[in-house]
Image: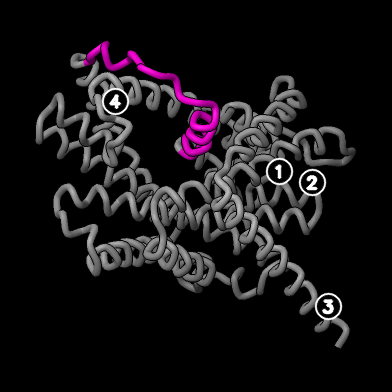
Amino acid sequence: VVTLIILCFAEVGSRFDATGGPYLYAREAFGSVVGFEVGWLQWLTRIMAFAANSNLLVEYLSLFWPGAVSEPWRSLIITVVTVALTAINIVGVRNATVFGNFFTIGKLIPLILFAVVGLFFINSGNYSFVARPGYAAFSSSVLLLIYAFTGFEMAVIPSGEVQNPQRNIPIALLTAIGVVASIYILVQFVSIGTLPGLATSTKPLADASRNFMGAAGAFVISVGAIISIVGNLNITILAGSRLPYAMAERNQLPRFLASTHKSFHTPHFAILISAAVMLALSISGTFIYALTISAIARLLTYAATCAALPKFRLTAGAPSAKFKAPAGILVSIASLILAAWLLSNSALKEARDAGIAAALGLLIYFAYYLSLRRKQLS
């Protein structure tokens, strides 16, 4: 599913060198209303992903300090991490990127160690399932699993700050899906083979590594998980803040969100407002709820980019593509069908709340549009 979607992103992304990602693609393909809604949903995706991972971070910290999951320490930890990452992103995109690269390396080493060592402790009996999951349970699980393979769109959002994005973005996307899929398959294979109670574990990698590497192994994997989560939070602030910035640049949100810091040249107001909302939802939310809302919003924005592929191909004068997906229109149609199937398996509560959030975005769009019209008429 994700590979098909990434092929659409690779082609559509190769047509642009400006900041915005799916928001920009939808706006150019379908107009300002659809573009705004996609941008709004992208921002919601980033916010809810940040909330989900902030809560997961506290869960892993509780392995070293059980009090981390209790108030007021939980809220204090989330606040300190959010403020620190916000400061890093305001100081400059280069600092945020270097920080992200450091954390990427730091998280890969424990994952590789887990996968390689764990292969020698596989219990083949763990792969025997007593009962197959029902269709509804399977479909709901796939919706959540999609989250693990998402985030690639964050690479295309700050394209205006990347060298030669029309060439480099498709290469990065296609390389990333191959590497990530390989690592996930291996990690999942080892997790199932070494942890009988995998389905009920809240910290599966740490629990599995404790089974075959003891307390020291659980410590190493937990540190790796914490590094991974902090790195993800950092990139989420980086990409998420560029959405209101890009929308304000195109006069769809108040212009002050497009202003940049005099010294650091970063969109400091967009960063601060995004981080403040992320912090509020992180403290008030739970991991699974935030994860599900993020997955629903992501799929909606992915669908817009997939639909944009045939629109650009069939529109005279559309920006030229530096990369063409093989059987691109068929890939686009298949992606849209699969996205619709996944969305149909959303729980009623999460689907309702995501719908309310989407409607709120439209309300903001038309309210701001009418305020601009009144200013022009006066």
Q: Secondary structure at mark 4?
A: helix
Q: Nearer the viewer, residue 349 or 191?
A: 349
Please report the residue visible at 36 percent of the width from the left and 17 percent of the height from the top.
129
The N terminus, quarter of image? top right
Disc 4: which residue? 191
* Residue 91 in view in this figure: no
Q: Which one is in front in this view, the residue at disc 2 or the one at disc 4?
A: 4
Quadrant of the image containing the C terminus: bottom right
For residue 349, above or below residue 310: below
Where is residue 93 shown, x and y percent of the image?
46, 56
Tell me the CA gap for discs 2 and 4.
43 Å
Residue 40 image offset from top left, x and y in percent: 63, 58
Query: In the image, 34: left or right of 90?
Result: right
Mark number displayed over residue 29: 2
Tell me the distance, in whole angstroms, between the alpha carbons under discs 1 and 3.
28 Å
Please, what secondary structure does the residue beneath circle 3 have?
helix
* Outermost residue to the top: 124
- Which amino acid is tagged 2? Ala
Residue picked out by circle 3? 373
- What separation in Å lies between label 3 and label 2 (alpha carbons)? 24 Å
Label 1: element kind: helix
In the image: residue 202, left or right of residue 41: left
What's the residue type where badge 4 is placed? Ser
Q: Is residue 141 magenta?
A: yes
Callouts 1 and 2 close, C-beta under 8 Å? yes
* Span colored in magenta: 122-147
